[in-house]
Each structure stands twice: as structure tokens, then as C-alpha cells.
Amino acid sequence: MTGYRELSHDLLVETLSRLPVKSLMRFRCVSKSWFSLLKDPNFIYKHLNRDDNMRLMVRVTYENYDVKDPFNDLITCFFLIPDKTLTDLHFQDLEAEMKDHNPLGPCDGIFCFFENENIYLWNVSMNEYRIVTKRKARLPCNTSIYCYNFGLGLDPTTNDFKLVLILTLYDGKRLSVHDLLPVAIYNFSTNSWRDLEGLFQMGHYYGSDSTDNVYLNGYCYWVASGHNSYNASILSFSMSDEVFEEIKGPNFPQITTYDESEMTSWRIGIYDGSLSLLYSEESGHSFSLWMMKGGFWTKHLSFGPFMEAYQPLGFWRNGEFFLESSDNRLVLYDSRYEEIRDLEITGIWFSVNILKESLIRL
């Protein structure tokens, strides 16, 4: 071959989908056809969903022993480990970007910040921002906003990206979480908000735990949390039909002890292209992976028991999972080789997020 023009289209797409975002941003200038390809939502999600397009981002809180003020003795750090193999644990500090913010995400490589009357979207890989005027929701009487949650994904019918904003409300009269959830949709193409007709009624509330939402094949999914935390329930939202549906989780054993109820029992994720739940059993000494196949939950694998108790934190590549030890260490478990690797990250509280390099333009 004498030039790229002799490459078949399929081979060109496959080759470009393996490259980092920074390279692809430069290649937009090669030709009009390449420019169009790199804007195509189908190519964007092909690139986004590659198994090697994953980086570990950690948010850790630890005690600052140099500060004597008991109300200001905690430090929270955000950092990214660029090495996708996690062999080199040197990290990139994101503190400057995250300072004074409580971000939601990342969802498909996009962070969401709330500040004053605005919402900020940030694509980490492209270092692009978009300021979105905050939607002023019409709230029922005696209610206030308890927390936010959001989802980001592609409407496969219109090829338009959408931001879904869910508000969990607090009922000041009942002194409890309100059953109705106002929902607003932001369309990237029209740069506009609109309220979803009516209020979604749900007997659970959806906290702002950004590790518990995923996008897959035109649907956003969130794990429901509420008073009956042992009953796994998932909220799905169709980006095309803009309809919510509650999906019952697998039939997990009921939590009976206080120690178990204080632990995070499951995490939602994508495993082998399917919606999945990683569930903690036997007070965190064993785990099971459940996959949604054909509308039914199937137990795919189990691992453990371990001498030490762990909490599920997130999915890595197939067969690998992030866990938090009882003494607050971050470890990576490889179910294929039945090995636990200590990542040498500790703190009094931390969370992990999988950051994907994203071509979604803001």
C-alpha cells in the first residue's frame, strides 16, 4: 500500500479506534473524511468502549497530622494513574481541577460539577469544558433538593448526546426523602433543557454515588439506594424513548447484622458487554458476579472466601475487580489467577472511578 487511501474503511476505523485521544485530535486535520469519522457517534463509542481505554482515578481522604484544627484535619485528593496496566503507580494530580468541587462522574469520560447557578461539564482527556445553565426545577411544596445524580449517553435514534439530571428531594413536612423525582434532559445539539413530563415516582432515593451508574446500548442505569438497602434495585432510562423502568436485582440474601448494613454490598458495572452486579456475601468475605442476560440475572462467577473482609468498589478489565480492605487499603483482585494485589493506596475513605478517554465534544 502506498497511502491511507488504500486502507479499507473497516480497517481504518479499527486502527484509529486503538489510538489515544490526543493523537486523534491531531488527525482531524488529515482529511474531511477523517474529520467526519472522528465526530461520528458510532466511532466515538467504539473508541470509548475498548477494553484498553481505561484509566484508574482515585479519590482518597486521609488525616492531615500537621493541622491541629480538629474541624480541618482531613485532606481529599484526586489523582489519575495513567498506566493502564497499573504496573507503574505514578499518578497525575487532578487536585487543581477538582479543588472546591464535589464532582459527579466520570460518565463516559465526562465529569459534572455544580457551582452557583451553573453546571460544568469537563472532558478530562480533551481538557474541554462546557458551562450549562442550571435548570431551575419546579419543586413540589415543602421540598428542597437533597442531592443530584446524572447520566450521560447517546440517543441511538437521533445520534445526539443527552445529559439526564435526576433530583432527589427532601420533604420538610414529612422529614424524609420525597417519593417523586423531578427529571430534566439536556440536549447537546440544541444546547437546551427541558423537563421530563411529570415526576417519576419511586420508593427509593438515588444518592450521588457516581460509581453506581453506567451507560450501555442506549440506556443509562443507576443503582437504587434506600431504607431496604439489601434489596438491589436498578433504575433504567431509555435515551430514545425517555422512559424510566425499575429493574429488580438478583435475589440476594437479606442483610441481618449491623456490620453488614454499614458495608456497600454491591457495585454496578459492565462485564463482557452485559449489565452486571458485583455482590458481597458473608460479610464481605466472598463475592458473586451477576450478569443480565436475556432479561434475567445469571450468576456468572464466585470468588472467596477470604480471611479478610472486603467491600466492592468497581470493575476493572474482565475478571478483575477493585476491593477495599477492612483496614482501608485499595486492592485489585484477579479472579482468573485468584490473586490479590495491594495497590499501596490507603486512607480513611476513598472511591475509585474508571476514567475512559472520550471523544465526546463539549
Image (spheres, helix red, strand yellow):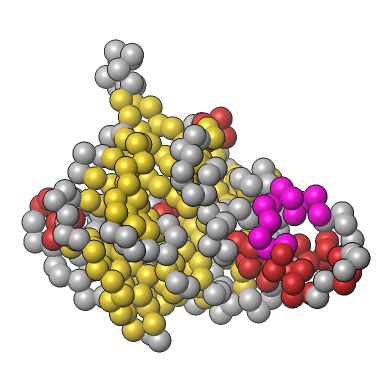
- Nearer the observer, 349 or 155: 349
Q: Residue furthest bottom?
A: 294
- Would residue 314 be found to the left or right of residue 327 on screen? right
- Return the x and y of residue 348 as percentages of the image width and height: 28, 34
> Hey, which quadrant is residue 316 in on the image?
bottom left
- Return the x and y of residue 11 as percentages of the image width and height: 74, 72
Q: Main secondary structure of the magenta part?
A: helix
Quadrant containing the N terminus is bottom right
- Would residue 9 be found to the left or right of residue 195 on screen? right
- Would residue 206 be found to the left or right of residue 29 on screen? left
- Nearer the observer, 337 or 158: 337
Quick check: 254 above or below 149?
Answer: below
Quick check: 356 above or below 276?
Answer: above
- Return the x and y of residue 67 as percentages of the image width and height: 33, 14
| Count of all numbered marks drawn on residues in the image | 0
- Nearer the observer, 297 or 174: 297
* Residue in the image at 25% along x and 52% along y: 311
* Residue in the image at 69% along x and 52% along y: 21
Residue 326 visible? The answer is yes
Q: Any magenta on residue 334?
A: no
The segment highlighted magenta reads 16-27
* Residue in the image at 63% along x and 76% along y: 156
- Return the x and y of residue 214 as percentages of the image width and height: 46, 64
Residue 213 visible? The answer is no
Q: Any magenta on residue 26?
A: yes
- Nearer the observer, 181 or 226: 226
